[in-house]
Amino acid sequence: MIPEGIGTWIHRRAVKSRGRTALVFRDQETDYATLSRRVDALAAALRDRGIEFGDRVAYLGNNHPSFIESMFATTLLGAVFVPLNTRLSSGELRFQLDDSGARLLIVGAGFASPATTATSGLEVRRIDVEDPLVDASALAEGIESYEHVLSTAPPLDVRPVVTLDDRALIIYTSGTTGQPKGAVLTHGNLTWNAINAITDYDVSSTERTLIISPMFHVASFGMGVLPTFLKGGAVLLQERFVPAEALAAIERLRATFISGVPTTYQFMMEDPAWATSDISSLRSMTCGGSAIPEHVIAAYAERGLAFSGGYGMTESSPGITAMPPWHSAERIGSSGLAHFFTTFRLRDPETGELVTAPGGRGEIEASGPNIFLEYWGRPDETAAAFTADGWLRTGDIGSVDDDGFVTIVDRLKDIIISGGENIYSAEVERVLSGIPGVTGVAVVGIPSERWGETPHAVVTLAPGASLDLDQLDAFCADRLARYKVPRSLEIVDELPRTASGKVRKAELRERHSHGT
């Protein structure tokens, strides 16, 4: 028998986990049987609107049951789900819709306006989720209501054969050359990543997983939602991250498992409700994106909790390594061991030789069934992402100790990680270079106690030109997501460059190494 794709998971759980809670949203529980019926209804409605195997269906919205229903319904048909980052500008959203060739866009409550701007001139059908608690506005002409679409759907009589090798998701990552790339994840990639998470994080069928990070990021979806559904646990959805609300949800819903980035955990421990919140139900906490600060580890340790850290990227669905919680306190800064069904190695970027000696440094290369298929429509960039023998080149420099624990020590890719969001400086530089009077620009990440890093712009100007941070901010408003806009600006006479003309970014970072 051909293994089936992830779209069938909820249907099978409706039988295996009959009567058990699948979702909790705004304290309303949905069992697996009900969720299965809604997924089937949406899949039938999408098919009735012309969505076929391989077509792309996009989603723009906060964490909401409709996100999960849309993903499972889309993949059940063998179509490809494209989750969009709600923090992007309308121009960025438009690019991703156009680049992916999305035929239909499902819009969450509160996002009708950016969706309208982003789809202007594109042949993209719209289905909007109505939610009077968020937006009481009436639907615009030609836009269908999500609940009406489900309630009037024809029967789903035939499900296509979808295998683990078929495309399931396209998730856009910021591009090293200035344009975002759509990383294509297959049903097999997501399945094996979920198996890795279940194996290394001991996810159980009684899990109550609180989702506080946005599901348009593969970390939240791949490490939290899918492993929980695969085991038949309950997913507790938070629309967006608010520290006090997250703490209250842990206590009220008796959450056992939570996944986030260092910033989210820091914000919770800094919230006034931290001291009085009962978080004793938590059994597991995973954290990725960057190293967890020692004072954050210590604060949770005082409550009897330890982190399961990890390292990964969108292209690995996302897990490459996991840190067992019982090792986290003694190995602060380490990203842990390779996931059970994934492996990595180090290669010296200068000599091209594999690094085998403990303590040696090299670019991390990863291999496993969770490694992505391709960049959508970009064969050259896909080829460049892999070694000659098929290992993923991560662009991160790591060091491995005698026991196989890896520590990330540097980056080859020019990436800034701010509050768990990846920012490629080339993309920001491309926008800033369009500001009148700017003759040169370099963007680097500088340390921030609150965000990990924030983008800092170093700019040269034409004679007589001027630029301040407010002007820069205004220029970027419709061109970049807010988190990508530099928080600080430095005007210089010239940028430090190598003999070949490349900007010496290490020198720029060193000037600001003490952070903000």
Image (cartoon, rainbow, N blue to C red):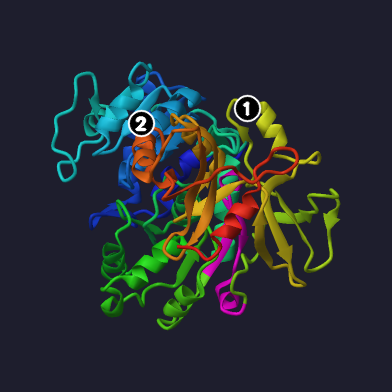
Residue at position x 47%, y 79% in the image: 298
How many numbered dots are placed on residues in this image?
2
The quadrant where residue 176 appears: top right
Q: Classify 10 Å Cα crowding around label 2: few (below 14), some (14-19), many (20 and above).
A: many
Q: Which residue is mark 2?
A: 90
Q: Mark on residue 206?
A: none
Q: Who is closer to the viewer here, 49 or 185? A: 185
Report x, y in % for residue 37.
32, 39
Give residue 311's position: percent from left, percent from top: 59, 58
Can you say which quadrant of the picture contains the C terminus? bottom left
* Nearer to me, 425 or 252: 425
312 sits to left or right of 204:
right
Whether residue 482 is visible here, answered yes or no, is yes
Residues rendered magenta in the picture: 308-330
In magenta stretch: residue 328? yes
Mark 1, Cα crowd under 10 Å, few <14 / some 14-19 / many 20+, is few
Residue at image location 61% in from the left, 65% down from the top: 335
- Specify which label sits upstream in the sequence, 2 or 1: 2
Q: Amino acid at mark 2?
A: Ser
